[in-house]
Image (spheres, grey):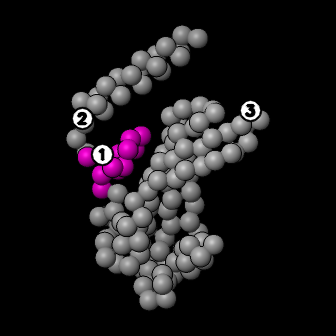
């Protein structure tokens, strides 16, 4: 609750959206984005100037056979996000390694493992279109 209160003071609205889902139930893996215009204050001393602050991450959710949520794990780089609220980083310095549809902690160059992963996703998509 304390983090909710702190962010409520910094942002008038702070929407959260799922960007991409990588696996189906019972364990769902997904990427997400949180964003808002920093118009309020953070820690009663840092004032926003209306800049757009974005936070990206990934998570997993475990569902039961009725598709009810049983467990959630959320991962993100909290240091970059808090740094932008404290004016230690500009919004442009946060999430620079984030790639839509990929892991935010990978570099911007495509690795051999990533090429194999993307190839296997294309194959899976092609196979699923046959059924």
From the top left corner, tell me how far across and down residue 19 is, in percent: 51, 45
**Pointer 1 with pointer 2, Cβ within 8 A:** yes
Asked if residue 86 is among those painted magenta in the image, a careful observer would answer no
Q: Which residues are magenta?
A: 96-107
**Residue where numbered disc 1 is placed:** 106
Location of residue 120 by image quarter: top left
**N-terminal label among 1 and 2:** 1
Please give the name of the residue rendered at 39% of the width and 60% of the height, measured from the top-left corner: 77
From the top left corner, tell me how far across and down residue 53 is, in percent: 43, 66
From the top left corner, tell me how far across and down residue 103 is, in percent: 38, 44
Badge 3, how many Cα within 10 Å: few under 14, some, many 20+?
Answer: few
Specify the label residue 111 is tagged with. 2
Q: Is residue 76 left or right of residue 110?
A: right
- Using the image as rendered, state which of residue 50 and residue 73 is in the foreground: 73
Badge 1, how many Cα within 10 Å: few under 14, some, many 20+?
Answer: few
From the top left corner, tell me how far across and down residue 14 is, in percent: 56, 66
Query: At numbered mark 1, what does the secondary structure look like: helix, strand or loop?
Result: loop
């Amino acid at each position: 609750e304390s983090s909710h209160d702190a962010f409520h003071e910094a942002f008038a609205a702070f929407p959260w959206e799922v960007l991409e889902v990588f696996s189906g139930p019972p364990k769902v893996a997904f990427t997400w984005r949180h964003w808002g215009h920093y118009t309020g204050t953070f820690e009663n001393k840092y004032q926003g100037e209306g800049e757009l602050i974005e936070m990206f991450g990934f998570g997993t959710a475990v569902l039961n056979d009725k598709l009810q949520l049983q467990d959630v794990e959320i991962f993100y780089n909290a240091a970059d996000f808090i740094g932008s609220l404290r004016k230690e980083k500009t919004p442009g310095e946060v999430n620079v390694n984030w790639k839509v549809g990929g892991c935010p902690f990978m570099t911007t160059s495509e690795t051999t493992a990533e090429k194999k992963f993307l190839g296997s996703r294309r194959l899976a998509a092609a196979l699923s279109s046959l059924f």
